[in-house]
Image (cartoon, rainbow, N blue to C red):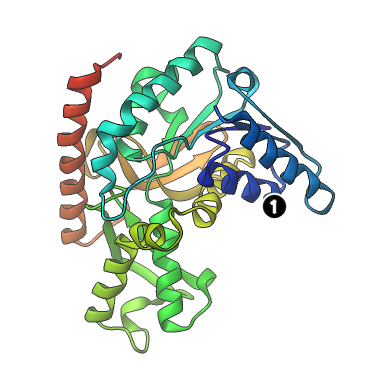
């Protein structure tokens, strides 16, 4: 299956391409970017590593790659400034994003294509993409809090000196300031996290605070996140291509889960070849449900401002 990455010359797009190459699941990876030379350089660099990774077609170019793509991954966007919230990006990124959607519509796309939105603010732009593209909402998804979730798990593992792969914990809601840590189901090797040696409420607060600020922390140290975002994107792509039906915290337009509607945010979502297969309303603590609904309200307020500015299509 072919994956086209719009914004493939950027840090996130090129990191995603490398993660997909190492994963070896996609049969073709196309890096699309206005900077054709840089995209071509990344594609050539990846191509050189092919003999030691996987037998894939790796190319670079423009929107001519979109019509035969099975997955269209949009990573293009203006870089977030230090200490700037993701929602502050909205006015700077919406016009760029809408122009990308316009180009996608001009060249056409498969009726069964899956669109993955990575550009920030991802929840707002996921809604805009679902509204503008002539695809079922189940085929338009955002990276959502999958990135926050793996950051969260990695920090818990580092603090408690356990294997990261054995830490299970979720972040739901907005990929941004109102994200919600789900402590009620957090475990290490199936052991409840709150019973684990060394765990306490102060530590929980510290780890969540650092998770929420992880994006800004990386930006200050290396101008932008790339590797972890690429891995998070690969999680989604693999689940789609292999029809794994993994449950992932990804963003899509909600229609009643936790009584949240007409806004895109992350809930436990079954992801397969056709996109969103189902959403699971797992039992949460009452406070977690309250915070998740509040996250939806926060996003809805911003979304209404965006739709008033750019208009709604559907």
Rendered residue at 24%/73% (across/down) = 205
> Along the line of sight, which residue is nearer the eye, 17 or 77?
77
- Residue 81 in the image: state x and y as whole percent: 32, 49
Rendered residue at 56%/22% (across/down) = 112
Report the quarter where the N terminus lies: top right
> Along the line of sight, which residue is nearer the eye, 57 or 190?
57
Residue 287 placement, left or right of 165: left
**Would residue 3 be seen by someone viewing this image from the given angle?**
no
Task: From this view, report whether residue 6 is shown above or below residue 110.
Answer: below
Residue 14 placement, left or right of 44: left
Rendered residue at 44%/40% (across/down) = 118
Report the quarter where the C terminus lies: top left
Give the SS element for disc 1: helix
**Which residue, as the protein is rendered here, is positioned at the far bottom?**
197
Rendered residue at 58%/49% (across/down) = 15
Which residue is the site of mark 1?
22
- Residue 27 in the image: state x and y as whole percent: 73, 36
- Residue 22 in the image: state x and y as whole percent: 70, 52
């Amino acid at each position: 299956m072919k994956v086209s990455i719009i914004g493939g010359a950027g840090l996130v797009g090129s990191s995603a391409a490398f993660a997909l190459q190492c994963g070896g699941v996609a049969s073709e990876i196309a890096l699309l970017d206005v900077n054709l030379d840089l995209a071509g350089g990344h594609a050539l660099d990846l191509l050189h590593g092919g003999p030691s990774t996987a037998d894939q077609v790796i190319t670079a170019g423009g929107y001519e790659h979109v019509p035969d793509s099975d997955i269209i991954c949009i990573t293009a966007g203006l870089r977030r400034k230090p200490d700037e919230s993701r929602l502050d990006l909205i006015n700077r990124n919406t016009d760029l994003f809408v122009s990308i959607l316009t180009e996608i519509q001009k060249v056409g796309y498969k009726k069964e294509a899956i669109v993955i939105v990575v550009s920030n603010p991802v929840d707002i732009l996921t809604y805009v993409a679902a509204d503008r593209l002539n695809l079922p909402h189940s085929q338009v998804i955002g990276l959502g809090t999958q990135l926050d979730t793996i950051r969260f798990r990695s920090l818990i593992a580092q603090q408690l000196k356990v294997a990261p792969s054995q830490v299970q914990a979720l972040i739901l809601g907005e990929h941004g300031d109102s994200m919600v840590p789900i402590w009620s189901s957090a475990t290490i090797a199936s052991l409840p996290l709150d019973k684990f040696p060394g765990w306490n409420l102060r530590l929980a607060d510290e780890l969540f605070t650092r998770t929420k600020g992880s994006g800004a922390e990386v930006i200050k140290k290396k101008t932008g996140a790339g590797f972890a975002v690429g891995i998070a994107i690969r999680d989604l792509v693999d689940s789609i291509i292999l029809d794994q039906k993994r449950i992932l915290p990804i963003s899509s337009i909600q229609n009643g889960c936790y009584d949240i509607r007409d806004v895109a945010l992350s809930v436990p979502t079954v992801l397969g070849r056709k996109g969103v297969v189902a959403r699971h309303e797992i039992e949460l603590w009452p406070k977690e449900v309250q915070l998740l609904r509040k996250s939806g309200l926060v996003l809805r307020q911003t979304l209404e401002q965006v739709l008033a500015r750019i208009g709604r299509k559907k």
